[in-house]
Amino acid sequence: MRTRLRRGRSAREYSTPAGTRGMTCEQIALALSALGAVLVGVILTVEGVTVRRGRLHFRNIRWRVAWRAAWVSFFLGIVVAGFFCGSQVS
């Protein structure tokens, strides 16, 4: 079922349920970094990747994709915090 927007109201008013607030920039950055760090830890724990002779060896392509996605998430959180979240120092 599609929700139709009434005239005079912006789409932003419909973005979150009444009485709730969206996530702040800092919360989004923290969530991305935490998700990436947790995924890296999980992949190492379940031995999706092993280190032999100084090189990473993955069980299969899915583990390699998950490994890269985890690191992208981690670093994206840092970039969001550094460049897109305003400074809180007054």
Image (cartoon, rainbow, N blue to C red):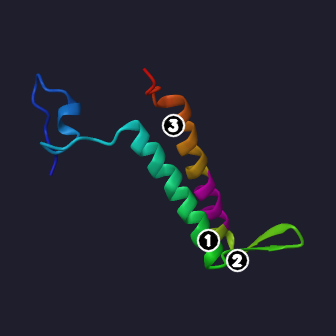
The residue shown at (23%, 41%) is 21
Magenta span includes 10: no
| Numbered badge on residue 43 | 1
- Above or below 89: residue 79: below
Query: Does label 2 or label 1 sit earlier along the sequence?
Result: 1
**Residue 22: x and y, percent?**
28, 41
**Residue 27: x and y, percent?**
40, 44
> How far apart in space, not on screen, are marks 3 and 1 (Cα)?
25 Å
Q: Amino acid at mark 1?
A: Ile
Instruction: Choose between 85 and 71: the one closer to the eye.
Output: 85
The residue shown at (43%, 27%) is 88
| Numbered badge on residue 81 | 3
| Numbered badge on residue 59 | 2
- The segment highlighted magenta reads 64-71
Is residue 36 toward the left or the right of residue 44 in the image?
A: left
Q: Amino acid at mark 2?
A: Arg
**Mark 3 residue crowding within 10 angstroms, few (<14) / some (14–19) / many (20+):** many
The residue shown at (53%, 44%) is 77
Is residue 23 toward the left or the right of residue 54 in the image?
A: left
Q: Secondary structure at mark 1?
A: helix
Is residue 73 toward the left or the right of residue 10 in the image?
A: right
Instruction: Choose between 12 and 2: the one closer to the eye.
Output: 12
- 3 vs 2, front mark: 3
